């Protein structure tokens, strides 16, 4: 299957993408991984992306699109893939359609994870990370530490990332509504979108997603 996963920040896309890709035996292709791999390997696209990032500029769509194309052409993606974070806007969505048409293939579905805006803010603004190990993550409501501000695992100080404040989260949501949400309508017109609630336990959301993909396939 060839799937695009969309949803606002805080919808759990990364977690669901990993689980769905494993269940469906297809590679999980995320924008973050594409950038890290290309920059780490020093590819021409990676070096170009790094030059923009070092200058504090947004990486142009054509660079991101180029990385995604290269990844989708790798052998492990021959029978399908799950795209997470790409396409991020209409221009990227149209470029993806053109690329797939050139390859004689098409998308099987677009999975839209739906979460109320206030819940997104609650999820992200409530996160606390351990300064000693960013892998230890807590939440003031859903997974609070035994002692406020102290990591249960190592006793390190817990902190809130600067971009996890309510103000920054709402700004990120505005960007999502403006830039990414229009691709949902674009794919609705193609009859590809399945919208599911991303509320509840992780495994419940995964099961909803699998059922939705089965119905659309």
Image: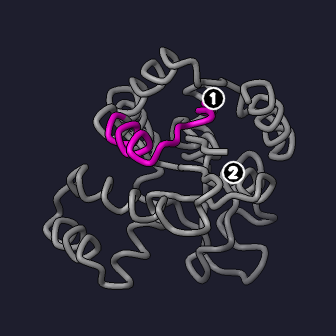
| Mark 1 secondary-structure assignment | loop
At horizontal 58% and vertical 61% (from top left) the residue drawn is 77
Q: Residue at x 52, y 37 (%)?
A: 106
User: Which label number is shown at residue 140?
Assistant: 2
Q: Residue furthest top?
A: 189
Residue 148 in which image quadrant = bottom right
**Residue 127: % across, % down:** 61, 54
Quadrant of the drawing holding the N terminus: top right
Q: Nearer the viewer, residue 142 or 203?
A: 203
Quarter occupied by residue 185:
top left
Taking the spot 36% from the left edge, 62% from the top edge, the residue there is 67
Q: 10 Å neighbourhood of mark 1: few (<14), some, or many (≥20)?
A: some
Horizontal arrangement in the rendering, residue 112 relative to residue 170 (left or right): right
Q: Which residue of the protein is positioned furthest toward the left in this rendering? A: 55
**Residue in the foreground of this view, choosing between 201 and 152:** 201
Quarter holding the C terminus? top right
Which portion, as a residue range, is magenta? 94-112
x, y percentage for residue 196? 71, 26
Under circle 2, the secondary element is loop
Mark 2 → mark 1, Cα distance in angstroms = 19 Å
Q: In the figure, 151 relative to 71: above or below?
A: below
Q: Is residue 195 above or below residue 125?
A: above
Q: x%, y% of residue 207?
A: 85, 38
Which disc number belongs to residue 115?
1
State yes or no: residue 111 in magenta: yes
Residue 30 is one of the magenta-drawn residues = no
Q: Is residue 114 left or right of residue 87?
A: right
Mark 2 and mark 1 lie on one chain; the one further toward the N terminus is 1
Q: Quadrant of residue 51?
A: bottom left
């Amino acid at each position: 299957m060839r799937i695009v996963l969309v949803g606002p920040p805080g919808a759990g896309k990364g977690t669901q993408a990993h689980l769905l890709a494993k269940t469906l035996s297809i590679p999980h292709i995320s924008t973050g991984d594409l950038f890290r791999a290309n920059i780490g390997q020093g590819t021409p696209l990676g070096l170009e992306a790094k030059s923009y990032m070092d200058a504090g500029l947004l990486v142009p769509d054509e660079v991101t699109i180029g990385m995604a194309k290269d990844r989708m052409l790798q052998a492990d993606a021959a029978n399908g893939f799950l795209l997470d974070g790409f396409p991020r806007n209409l221009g990227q969505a149209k470029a993806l359609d053109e690329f797939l048409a050139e390859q004689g293939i098409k998308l099987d579905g677009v999975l839209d994870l739906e979460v109320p805006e206030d819940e997104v803010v609650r999820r992200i603004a409530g996160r606390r990370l351990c300064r000693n190990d960013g892998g230890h993550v807590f939440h003031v409501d859903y997974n609070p530490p035994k002692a406020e501000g102290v990591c249960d695992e190592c006793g390190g100080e817990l902190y809130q990332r600067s971009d996890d404040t309510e103000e920054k989260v709402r700004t990120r949501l505005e960007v999502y509504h403006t830039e990414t949400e229009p691709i949902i309508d674009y794919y609705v017109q193609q009859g590809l979108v399945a919208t599911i609630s991303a509320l509840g336990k992780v495994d419940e959301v995964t099961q909803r997603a699998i059922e939705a993909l089965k119905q659309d396939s």
